[in-house]
Amino acid sequence: MCFIIENNNVAFNVLMITTLLAAADPVTFHWTPKCAAVMILCNVLAYAIARANIAKPNEGFELPNAKFFGGMSHASVVAANSLGHILGIGAILGLASFGAL
């Protein structure tokens, strides 16, 4: 991505902000079976939340073995997985920052 900036102060500010954001990134961690377990638990929690809150979970494109997914449709499964991964990455980053993972 290329920005055309006529004022050098703006370019300096953009550079400083991106540098500060890069420096604010926490130390990365290694993927372990503990991280996988946290992600799986968050996805199971998301399926429970989706099953309880989606008004018509079985309406739409049906999955081949819907009984394995609680009878939910394709859209409901994608929504539950998306929520599970959002919860999972939040939990993993939070636990990693506390030193639990």
Image: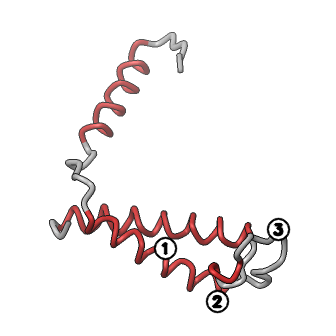
* Relative to 15, residue 75 above or below: below
Q: Nearer the viewer, mark 2 or mark 1?
A: 1
Q: Crowding near pointer 3: few (<14 within 10 Å), some, many (20+)?
A: few
Labels 2 and 1: the sequence-earlier one: 1
Kindly identify which numbered label has been placed on residue 52: 2
Quadrant of the rendering where the C terminus is positioned: bottom left
Kindly identify which numbered label has been placed on residue 61: 3
- Pointer 2 and pointer 1: residues touching (CB < 8 Å)? no
Q: Is residue 32 left or right of residue 87?
A: left
Distance in Å between CA atoms under marks 1 and 3: 21 Å
Mark 3 is on which residue type?
Phe
Which residue corresponds to the image point at 55% horizontal and 68% vertical from the top-left? Answer: 83
Q: Secondary structure at mark 1?
A: helix
In the image, farthest residue toward the bottom: 52
Q: Which residue, given by chain and number where applicable, does mark 1 sit on? A: 43
Residue nearest the observer in this picture, 9 or 82: 82
